[in-house]
Every structure is written in structure tokens, then in C-alpha cells.
Amino acid sequence: MKKLIYLITIALLVPVLSGCEDFLDTKSFTTKDSNSFPVNEEDANMMLNGVYAMLNVSHAEGIDSWFMTAEMASDDRFGGGGKNDRPGQAIAHLMTTAADQFNPLWRDHYTGISRANQAVAALEIMEDGPLKNQKIGEAKFLRAFWFFDLVQLFGDIPLPSQVPESVKDVEIPPVQADAKTEVFLVIATDLWDAYTTMPAYKAGELLSGTVTKWAAAALLARVYLFYTGFYGETSLPTTEGAVTSEQVIAALEDVINNSGHDLLPDYRSLWPYTNKATKPDYPFATDAPDWVEGSANKEVMFSIKFNPNASDWGPSTTVGYSNSVALFFAPRQGNRDMTTIFPMGGGWGMGTVNPKLWDEWPASDPRRKASIYNQADEAISAYMWGADQQVEETGFWQKKVVTTAAYSPTGDYWATFWRSPDYGSFGANNIQLGNGSDLILIRFADVLLMHSELKKDAAGINRVRARVGLAPISYSDTALRVERRYELAFEGLRWGDIRRWGIAADALNAIYGAPIRNEGIATTMQPMGPGMKARYEATKGFFNIPQTQIDLANGTLTQNAGWSGNDANYIGY
């Protein structure tokens, strides 16, 4: 019985079976099987749709999704939420509320990896050529993407990168692979293969949200920078040999010169508050070009797409079809009139912005107000502090991703925009499940900044600065780091940046003393337990592997350092 339970559960951790010829050797003449499927573009898309679907579940659903974890763990965001939202607060203090806190994330990422493994293996039967290369490249990118999330979160992890050949193989507990020498080898090999073999479709030629050669190059550079910075190496290993800085620079220059991607003329039109319905009531955005989303947006290189019509609180696989980041990171205003926080919508109040970021960010940089909602500056009427037991509240909120259930002072913002033909009809006005804007994960601006960082020149930095009317500067590592902090704020990258630069412990410790309010009462951010610097030094920024997975692995998984004892336990406010 124990083996049966293990087998059922491990399917969440290890790839699903493919041919299994030793178990069953038959050929179907009435249904698609691995001998006849996939053979054409329609077949390939059917298979890959199931892989892409796991992006919604694994990356944009729940407090402990990768994106939300990376944001709340960084020095620019706090946990926030209500007193009952302890998991998010725990993440922000590098602590935990439960031994299995990350089990849904672990499960969903490995389910995505399993589907990608299956796709890579099955797509091999297609006829050689650009279509096959494109589709296998998409699957390899997505597999690398999930492994990169996992290795940043947990360090040494299981590495199922092939389809098991028999049922017996599935029963074998997964081995914990070394992150530096084994996991990054698989990630880099997948991304290098995807970049070097996928067809060079120009920006906008494929359906929005589809992985491209250019996205693979950008993620390869991101992986290279993290790997070489965090582990102190000078190249990135692949099965075909090391990828060097010069090769990554060349890949980025290929993107810059040949992809068709470019910066949008106005930084504001990247974000949903510049939609047609909002702008007339929002002076900050009135003169901005209309919000650009989907394939028309040449700056976005990879994003997660959503369809709230399919979203439901029932099966966990459907909640992620709505953009939960918008819900979790929106102001917690309870039943208060939502026009008071326009253009923001209401939500659960997590990921409050560190006031020190606002104070350190020059007011002359238009990206500050384009990225941060400051209630003292923008609230139309009295802002309600401490709503619904809000803690770690600062009055500052990110406004790059906003909920649909917001109302303008002069009309129904949601009904006039989110239901408009320009965007698509997304059911009822639902603050929790009606959020349909894309979650942007890779932008062309990041490519320019990574290129500057690797070449140690300011060309990319100054191109990004020129877009927002800022004067050119000379290159320095400090200038590059500041530019990334401002340009890419609240896009899930700051946490990885401060870790790879080796400044995380001090940056996290600097949050203390920041003004906050707990249930409306003014105070300052104070250490929980031993404090952020001590917690980072104890854990190196890796989180706790779910205890369920350790138990299932029968001794092949070892818990990360720093996650035993009282120092790891978050008790809340």
C-alpha cells in the first residue's frame, strides 16, 4: 500500500510515463498515440497547450508562487496583508509558518516539468525542420524556466529531465542533484539548444505568450548572470561545453539587432492603468499613449496569459487562469469605496512597498510615479489605514499590475474597459477571479541592461534612461544596479539581483526602521526572530523544501540549512 501511495504522489514530482513498451506494446488504430502523435503543427500545439497551462498554476497562483515569493523576499517589498496572511509575511522575513508551505509550488513546478519532458520526447517524431525546432524549443524553454525557479528557491533539487521508461522507474525516489554542477547544466543546455535551433520569428509574428528564440536568449543571459554571480564562476556549463560571457553578449546583441523587439516610446503604456477607460479620470496617465498588450507590444518578450472566464476557486488548476498577482498585491481596503484608491483596485494588501525605495528614488525620474502608488500623493479622498487588520502597511503600492475591480470617479471602470471589445469579455466584475492582464516576465529593457552589465558599458543603460527623458551617464556597477532597481521594480527580479551581487544580507537588513502601520497604528519595521541579515546568512536565501517531499523521498532529499529550530518559525503580529 505504501508503494501505491508513493507512486500516485510521485507523479507530481517525476515525469509522466511515455511509451512504456515493457509494460504494454500495442498500437492504436483509432486514437492518437506516441507512434502517430504529434506529427503536425496542430498536434504540437495541442500537446504544448498542456505545458503552457502550468505557467498559470505554477507561477501566478497563491501566496508562495515564485513571482510573489521573489517580490516579498526582496528589500523593496514587505509581506503585508492582514494579520491572518502569515505565510506571505513569513516569506518576507525569510521564515516559515509550516513545514509544507511550499508544497503546492513544488508540486506544480514538477508537474510542469513532467509535461515538458513528455513534450520534448514526443515531439521528436515530427519531421525535421523549423516547426519541430520551434516546438521542441518552446518545451525546453519552459522546462528550464521551471528548473530555474526551483533552483533559486531551494538550491539542490531533484532533476527529472527525461521520461521514465517503465513503471518501475517511477517508483524510484528522486535523487537530490547538486545545483551548481548538475541542475544548471540542464537549464543552460536547454536554453542554449532553444536559442541556437529555434527559427528567428520577429516580434509580433507569433501568438502573444508564445516562447521565442529571443526569449530563450534573454533567459539564458539571466541564468548566466545569476550562476556566475552567485557561485563565483566565469562561464555557464552545458553538455556541449561552457557558455562564455562573449557568447551571451553575442546572443543579446542578436536580440537587440534582429528580433524586432524594442522599447515602447512611453514607459507608462506598459501598464494597465493607461487603458482607454482609465486615462480620462487619471491625470498622471491622461497624456500617455494607450496601454499596449499582447503581440502589439514589441517590448514584452515573454509573459503569462490569463483567461478569467475559465477561472474558479474549485479545482486548483483553474484559479491560476486569473492573474492572482493583481489580487494579492492590491490595497486592502475592505468594503470601502474603491474610488478612493483609483486607479488601483482592491485586493488582499500583500507586497506593500518599502517607503525607503520611494525616498531613495529621485522624484525627477518619471518611473517612480509610473511604478508606485503613493496614497499621500494620489488618494482621491481619505485613505483607510488598517483596513481588515492590515499589517506592514506603508501607504505605498506597486501599480504595474492592478485588479480589474476598480471604479473611476465618473463611471464603472471595469465595465467600460475590462469588458470592452478592445480587451475581451471577461465575465462578471470579480475582484478575485476577474483579473486578465498579462504578467510580464521578460522585457526588452532587461535585455539592454543585461547587455550593459556584461559589456561594462553604458549604451544599454542610456537607451533605457533616454526613454524616460533622463540624461546619459557613464558605466559603473553601482549605476547599473540602481538602473535595474528602478526600471525593473516589482517585476520579480530584485531578489535574484541582490543575491547574485552578494549584497542581499545588508540590503535586507536595511529595511529596519522603515515606517509602517499595523492595524492603523504607526510603528517601524522591526526584526522578527534573529533578523534578516542573520536569516539570510543562515539560509543563503534558499527556502525550506516541503516536508512532504522529504518524507516521500525516503532519505534522498535533505532539508536546506537554516530551516530547523525556532529561528525559522514565524509567529506573526
Image (cartoon, rainbow, N blue to C red):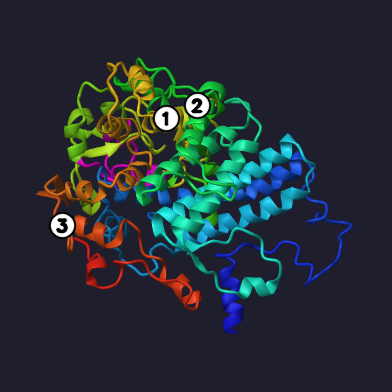
SS at circle 2: helix
* Cβ atoms under marks 2 and 1 closer than 8 Å: yes
- Mark 2: few/some/many CA within 10 Å (<14, 14-19, 20+): some
As shown in the figure, which amino acid type bears the numbered disc 3?
Answer: Pro
The answer to which of marks 1 and 3 sits earlier in the sequence is: 1
SS at circle 3: loop
- Mark 3: few/some/many CA within 10 Å (<14, 14-19, 20+): some
Of the pair 276 and 203, the residue shown nearer to us: 203
Mark-to-mark CA distance, 2 and 1: 8 Å
Residue 389 is situated, as x and y percent measured from the top left of the image, at 22, 54
**Pointer 2: what residue?**
253
Quadrant location of the C terminus in the rendered image: bottom left
Mark-to-mark CA distance, 1 and 3: 37 Å
* Cβ atoms under marks 3 and 2 closer than 8 Å: no
Residue 533 horizontal side relative to residue 270, left or right: left
**Pointer 1: what residue?**
451
Residue 270 is situated, as x and y percent measured from the top left of the image, at 42, 27
